[in-house]
Image (cartoon, rainbow, N blue to C red):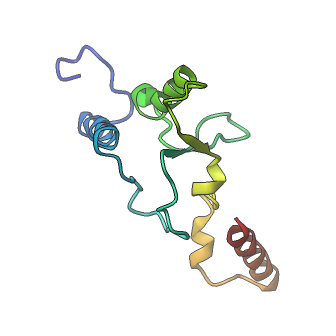
């Protein structure tokens, strides 16, 4: 990347390095990584060797997070590892569906922090919160 031989995609060299460092630290030391804007609704201590699957936009078929050319060593890395180790008993991990970590689409989360526009909007928000609490 530094020599210009590899196209980093839409993500800068600094952010690419940060993503790789994050993956390496989690691999070596374990732990939990969350984006700073994540709101934790439940205790995460029960999650052992767990990763969240990424969502795909139903219209564009693109991933809704980290959708960039550089994804080969970040979000797709996990998918490639899962395929390789699937069924091997020494690799004990769980892949949870996107709804486990992203119960609200990031493009719609703002509405949870705004006053409801009307009674119907208020009812929709309450129903969505009920669904989130049932998980």
Q: How many marks?
A: 0
Quadrant of the snapshot with the C terminus? bottom right
Left/right of residue 122 with respect to residue 50 in the rendered view = right
Left/right of residue 102 with respect to residue 119 in the rendered view = left
Q: Is residue 26 above or below residue 71?
A: below
Quadrant of the snapshot with the N terminus? top left
Left/right of residue 11 with respect to residue 82 in the rendered view = left
Left/right of residue 130 with respect to residue 76 in the rendered view = right
Residue at image point 25% right, 33% down: 13
Q: Is residue 61 visible?
A: yes
Residue 108: x %, y % from top left: 63, 62
Relative depth, front residue between 12 and 72: 72
The residue at the far front in this view is 89
The residue at the far top in this view is 5
Residue 91: x %, y % from top left: 50, 31
Residue 83 occupies quadrant: top right
Q: Is residue 28 above or below residue 79?
A: below
Residue at image point 38% right, 61% down: 36
The residue at the far left in this view is 3
Residue at image point 51% right, 68% down: 43
Residue at image point 68% right, 35% down: 60
Relative depth, front residue between 44 and 16: 44
Residue 30: x %, y % from top left: 34, 46
Q: Is residue 53 visible?
A: no
């Amino acid at each position: 990347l530094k020599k210009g031989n590899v196209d980093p995609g839409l993500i800068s060299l600094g952010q690419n390095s940060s993503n790789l460092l994050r993956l390496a630290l989690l691999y070596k030391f374990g732990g939990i990584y969350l984006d700073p804007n994540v709101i934790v609704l439940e205790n995460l201590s029960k999650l052992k060797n767990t990763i969240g699957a990424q969502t795909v936009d139903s219209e564009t078929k693109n991933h809704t997070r980290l959708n960039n050319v550089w994804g080969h060593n970040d979000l797709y890395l996990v998918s490639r590892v899962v395929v390789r180790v699937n069924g091997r008993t020494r690799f004990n991990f769980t892949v949870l569906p996107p709804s486990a970590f992203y119960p609200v689409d990031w493009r719609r989360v703002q509405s949870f922090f705004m006053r409801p526009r009307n009674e119907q909007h208020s009812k929709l928000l309450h129903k969505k919160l009920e669904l989130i609490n049932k998980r």
